[in-house]
Image (cartoon, helix red, strand yellow):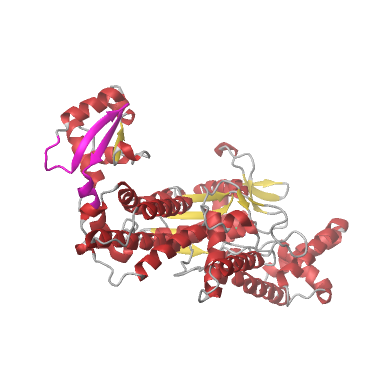
Amino acid sequence: MINFKTEISKKISKVIDIDDKEINSYLEIPKDETMGEYALPCFRLAKELRKSPQNIAEEIKEKLEIDNDSFIEKIENVGGYLNFYIKQDILVKNILEKVDTQKEKYGSSTIGNGKNIVIDYSSPNIAKPFHVGHLRTTVIGAALYNIYKYLGYNVIGINHLGDWGTQFGKIIEGYKRWKDEYDIESDPINELTKIYVRINAACKEDETILEECRNTFKKLENGDEYCQQIWEKFRDLSLKEFQKVYDLLGSKFDSWNGEAFYKDKCKEVIDKLEEKGVLKESDGARIVDLQEKGINTPCIIEKTNGSTTYATRDIAAILYRARTYNFDKAIYVTSYEQTLHFKQIFEVAKLLGLDEKYTNNLIHVPFGMVHLKSGKISTRDGNIIKLEDLLNESIQRAKVIIEEKNPNLENKEDVAKKVGVGAVIFNDLSNSRIKDEIFDWDIILNFQGETGPYVQYTYVRTNSILSSIDKIPTYNEIKVEKLLDKHSIKVLKTINQFNDVLINATEKNEPSFVARYLIELAQNFSSFYNENKIIVEDNDTKNARVYLTKIVGQVLKQGAELLGIEMPERM
Ligand code: ARG
């Protein structure tokens, strides 16, 4: 097998005396397919070589003599871009060989071996609704988790539950007062939310109630049995509710250590900061001033009443994760609203004297808001949309569509679940994460759009083609020359990019690269399918096209699974 990129880099390196690794990092895959397979943007070398991109391109081109045995067909200089055209039969053979070598692990890699990636995602708050923002972190986090893993990394998925903080003083106090008025067992989160809203209002009216709530949290912190019991009850009830969503999405975590886990680990943080002389008094609270780091808001480490904060617990978690997981990257997936928080805690972690190996690899992965196209999602009691309801509604809607398109389908329930949930996940991942997301049923569930159901539908099409064939050919039976038409090559080139796309997705922590890739592959396959009859007289042509169909299906399925989307076999 030839790694064209590496080989081209080496060839160029030889004639211009620049390290081939550097050249390799500049080589691009041209968007326009008439521009060849690889392009060197020579402006990248202009500074180093003190020549114009145009001259550099000409010079390299002249010096690179192509012998007949080379895999290179031709080299062209287009405006300072040096385009390399690979001989198409060699290219196709090479791609097929690569797919065959890796088999069902195609696209995977060992680049992550020996490296630990911690991903903090989902992390909803106990006794509060699991809202749409939490759906996004759950879905983005899970996709990153799967992609890193597929590239050979050791990945640790952490659900950093919001299960500690002064608000629990309030909820416990409210519960003590009014528990008989609310049906907490049957609808825990909504009922506890109501209590929380009510006690907050009461605190505003009456300082003494607020004081009581503070004391209650103190008691909880000090391990008071009654408070502890109620807290555990809220935690259990909430987790049971969250689990319904996790079951629908197929979410799994390696650790459920939430904020409460760090309650006895904050002292070390405070002591260390004190020792380093960076802890300051401010209105009775203790803070770290970060002005010198260009952050105007100080990080509050200890409140006036001596309680720790969300930030303190997160800093303790950084220490813990560095020690426990020896991470190469620690990733936090939350909405962009928490950007300041993460800037603060990452800076404070540096002040703690933690090794740079860790502090340089703390990564906040922010995402945008979700806007609901109004009136389209049914809501229960006002504004709070239960995610479980949302996913179930998607499943129901998918079922209606399937019922209409394919009334005789077996396992309709199962297919509707895969399509409904897959549609929501894909919608979440299909645009760059920082963009706000518009939630619109008509778009999400459109089988023809750039959607999850479209990718699933394309996969199902590959499947039904294969099931009409007696014997699916193996790699050795394929005649490369039968796959040299424009459409086949386009599909094959897309297949060839799978691993690069996954690597890019981890470099930018951007699962949307994979989602866009799947759309492109599905669309290219559709063009191939529309232009080329698959079941034809000529056996070699048929075999080649069937084989191509098979590997398209394989990559679509693998890619979708990495995003957390299940593929139905029929739909
Ligand atoms: N519980 C937080 C929230 O719902 C998210 C926690 C994110 N993770 C972290 N380590 N701070 O907003």
Q: Measuring 49% from the left and 58% from the top, which residue is drawn there?
A: 454
State the residue in front, 472 or 135: 472
* Residue 366 in the figure: left or right of residue 168: left
Q: Measuring 79% from the left and 61% from the top, which residue is drawn there?
A: 197
Asked whether the viewer can see residue 482, the reply is yes
* Residue 561 in the figure: left or right of residue 99: right
State the residue in front, 226 or 343: 343
State whether residue 556 is above or below residue 344. Answer: below
* Residue 556 in the figure: left or right of residue 198: left
> Which image quadrant is residue 6 in?
top left
Q: Measuring 25% from the left and 57% from the top, which residue is drawn there?
A: 96
The x and y percentages for residue 477 are: 20, 63
> Which image quadrant is residue 390 in?
bottom right
Q: Is residue 561 magenta?
A: no
Please, which residue is most extreme toward the right here?
A: 205
The x and y percentages for residue 442 are: 62, 55
Q: Is residue 78 magenta?
A: yes
State the residue in front, 157 or 295: 157
State the residue in front, 60 or 321: 60
State whether residue 508 is above or below residue 387. Answer: above
The x and y percentages for residue 535 are: 32, 62
Q: Measuring 28% from the left and 48% from the top, which residue is drawn there?
A: 485
The x and y percentages for residue 120 are: 52, 59
* Residue 305 in the figure: left or right of residue 123: right
Please, which residue is most extreme toward the left here?
A: 68
Q: Which residues are magenta?
A: 66-93
Asked whether the viewer can see residue 121, the reply is no
